[in-house]
Image (cartoon, rainbow, N blue to C red):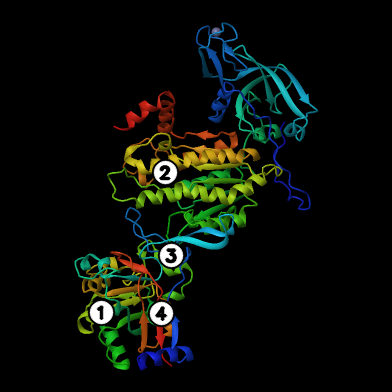
Amino acid sequence: MTSPLTRPRRKNPVLRTRLPNLPPGGRSRVALGLTAAAALGRFELQCCRDCGKVQYPPSEACQVCLSERLQWREQSGAGELLAVTELAHSNDLFFRERLPWRLGMVRLDCAVTVVAHLHGDCAAAGARVRVEAVLDRSGQGVLIAMPDKETAHMADDPQLREFTCDPKYRKVLVTDGRTAVGQAIVHSLIRAGADLIWVGQSEPWKQFPGIEALRTLPQVSLVPLDLSDSEAVSELCAEIGGRVDIVINNAELHRPFGIAARAGIEAARAEMDINYFGLLRLAQGLGPALRARGADGQSSAVAWVNLLSIYALSNYPPHGTFSASKAAALSLAQCLRAEMRPAGVRVINVFPGPIDDEWNQTVLPPKVSAAALATAITRALQQGIEDVFPGDVAQEWLARWRDNPKALERELAG
Amino acid sequence: MSTTLLQLVSELASGAIRVIDLTQTLSPDFPQIALPPEMGQCWPFRIEEISHYDERGPAWYWNNFSCGEHTGTHFDAPAHWVSGRDLPNNTTDTIPVGDLIGPACVIDCSAQAAADADYLLDVATIERWEAVHGRIPPRAWLLMRTDWSKRTDPVAYQNYDETGQHTPGPNAEAVRFLIDERQVIGFGSESIGTDAGQAHYQRPPYPCHYYMHGSGRYGLQCLSNLDLLPPTGAVLICPPLKIRKGSGSPLRVLALVGA
Ligand SMILES: [Zn+2]
């Protein structure tokens, strides 16, 4: 049985903060197929289009018929635990610090045998398990065998927590509390057990509904934060940077225009100033502090969440300048991901379809509600997912984009 | 050199004439005017470091800043309002520079503004002031002291509720009176506009902007230290930046005050 996580004790300030070590990060290009699926929270294996064989580990050709016509397909992960082994020694720095470490050999129902990290609640050999693909601190897809039925405090398993970014007992910065989405994120984090939530508030003289109610929540501390103001961003980052474990950058500016529908560049510039430069300012301010705390005990710095948009993948012309700003933010988020990787801090990009807010008032449903978006963000942290596509529109656009980005571009052009 | 100018500089040097700064500091912390979000917005003041004796410039410190023409303590030219759009010399680069130094009359409305954030200055109040301090001379600035600049908390300074901003200003009749009967050169206020916060609902909307600029007069807003000025006798120096076709500009406003 997993022992429930307890609030970590205050750390001893005379001891050196441990530096992050990463598990082995090298992969062949073909093996990155597992990573690509794990980034979305999916477990996929190569499947031969000619003989139907599912195979692991990934390789260039089918192990049975040598066909190169291989396709990554989602797997249920159901299987039987064949053998368990406990690693008592490792020369790898990451595992050396986390010994003992349990591994298991699992026979999947699709007739493939895999070696997987093992959740502590997986019983002895012979037990039914469910194998999942998750990202490790190197950002690479690995397999973990989970008990096939939910167990108590399952998320608190120490080995599982090496792959997730659970907000429980962690301290979170939510950059904008003025919106329904920001407020829903705060409530979702509280339900997930976050210890302390700093909530950014820009232009405090503007009376936005709901933000004052946040002030009454014991976990919440409202802080002045306007991502367009470099000085204010640096000041807040200096003040709280050493304590933030999770950043959720939900501040965004959205004006629904293309090129021709709005004269001048002021609205578009304002979007870039928050959506792109705001992320850059925040990343310069908080990135170094988070990187320094990637292995700082149970409540280490662990994740950075960006609220992007499905329009970041392909421009939606009626909201063309907003799309462009989110595409810029996506590109910068990839840079941030690369720069946070050495510390094992995960950068999670969230690509919702149209959010049900005033700027999408004239967009037809389905639209993502603030609560659904917040739940998706919290779940991504709890499950360690890197790219999140909440809502039907986002899922559908993602499928179309993965299938044929040019076709999607043409379809969106109307 | 004229003896008047010589006397001026010598009295400035001796302190017999004091220089008072009526300007708010330009900083990101000072709030900017806010319009409904679907409208175009005036930039707040922002500043980005170019270098600070570091690898970006080893021996020097400097910044880039950005702001709107109507950010911080600023000057409104007649072209700012639609009513002044077709007047000659109506922009910051063409207004006669002689207009930028002139006498100031200060009407103390601080008690009224403290009692009522939506206070509107009316003609009767101006006439009562004149009964004590004398008639407002032609080509003078009329400065409305409200002590609003002492509200250093931006929330109190902006004073928004769900019906919008609540700050004092003049009523339409007072504006017409100042233009038609007293030939003022402009109107100055301590709050974020020369008009009251709820001036959208006045008739006409924004009467101070509408009539002053329509008559080729100027505006100064976000002034401070008006409580340090005498009711009459101060001289205002308020040249805006020479922006081509500028509708206004942030500026340093100085007042000369005799002993
Ligand atoms: Zn095959």
Mark 4 element type: strand
Q: Amino acid at mark 4?
A: Leu
Query: Which residue is disc 4 drawn over?
Result: B254
Label 3 and label 4 in one chain: yes
Mark 3 element type: loop
Which residue corresponds to the image point at 67% horizontal and 46% vertical from the top-left?
A292
Q: Nearer the viewer, mark 4 or mark 1?
A: 4
Q: Nearer the viewer, mark 4 or mark 2?
A: 4
Q: What is the chain identity of the residue bearing mark 1?
A: B
Query: Which residue is disc 1 drawn over?
Result: B174
Query: Which residue is disc 2 drawn over?
Result: A325
User: In the image, which disc is placed on residue A45?
Assistant: none
User: In the image, which disc is placed on residue B31?
Assistant: 3
Q: What is the chain identity of the residue bearing mark 4?
A: B
Q: What is the chain identity of the residue bearing mark 2?
A: A
Label 1 and label 3 in one chain: yes
Which residue corresponds to the image point at 58% horizontal and 38% vertical from the top-left?
A338
Q: Position of residue A23 (x, y in %)?
A: 69, 31
Q: Position of residue B5 (x, y in %)?
A: 37, 89
Please indicate whether residue A80 sits to the left or right of residue B245 in the image: right
